[in-house]
Image (spheres, grey):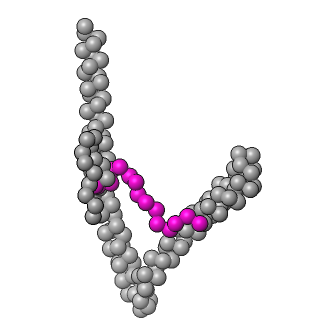
Amino acid sequence: MWRNKKLIVGVTLAAVMLFGGLGAVAFAADNGNDSQSASNVTLLDRVCEIYQEKTGVTIDQEALKDSFAQAQRERREAALEKHLAEMVDKGVITGEESSQIQEWWKSRPDVMMDFSPLKQGNFRGMGQPPAPPE
């Protein structure tokens, strides 16, 4: 009898900790995105101001954002090529498969969909109707 009570208490504690952790993650993810994007814009503004103070030349923020995005794309593509080359060397995939993956990567859409269940508005409990269209 005592073992059953221990088991019930243990399972209940584990469930509470699990759901509490999920709630904390959802709260952190919800609050982190807005403040992070705002801080990035603020940081970008400040970088442009400092550069202008030091050099007297104004930086076009849109060109700077585009440059960062291009650099990120180039680094991602280089990392993919390196990883695929390692996989070909190890015999995991063939050179033809590597080429097909690279072609797919380059032809994918630029906008990626975020299907995160923790994103605000995407997580609905069981039995609730879908959210109305926006």
Whether residue 132 sits left or right of residue 89 in the image: it is left
Residue shown at 28%/38% (left/top)? 19
The image quadrant where one finds the C terminus is: bottom left
Residue shown at 28%/51% (left/top)? 130
Q: Residue 116, how many percent across, how many down? A: 38, 52
Q: Residue 29, how many percent across, how many down? A: 32, 53
Q: Which residue is the extreme one toward the top?
A: 1
Q: Residue 46, how many percent across, how many down? A: 35, 78
Whether residue 94 sits left or right of residue 55 in the image: it is right
Q: Is residue 21 visible?
A: yes
18 part of magenta stretch: no
**Residue 121 position by quadrant:** bottom left
* Chief SS of the magenta region: loop
Q: Residue 7, how many percent across, how many down? A: 29, 17
Residue shown at 35%/49% (left/top)? 117
109 part of magenta stretch: yes
Residue toward you, 103 or 24:
103
The residue segment tinted magenta is: 107-121
The image quadrant where one finds the N terminus is: top left
Residue shown at 65%/63% (left/top)? 103
Q: Is residue 26 visible?
A: no
Residue toward you, 37 or 103:
103
* Number of marks: 0
Q: Which residue is the extreme one toward the bottom?
A: 56
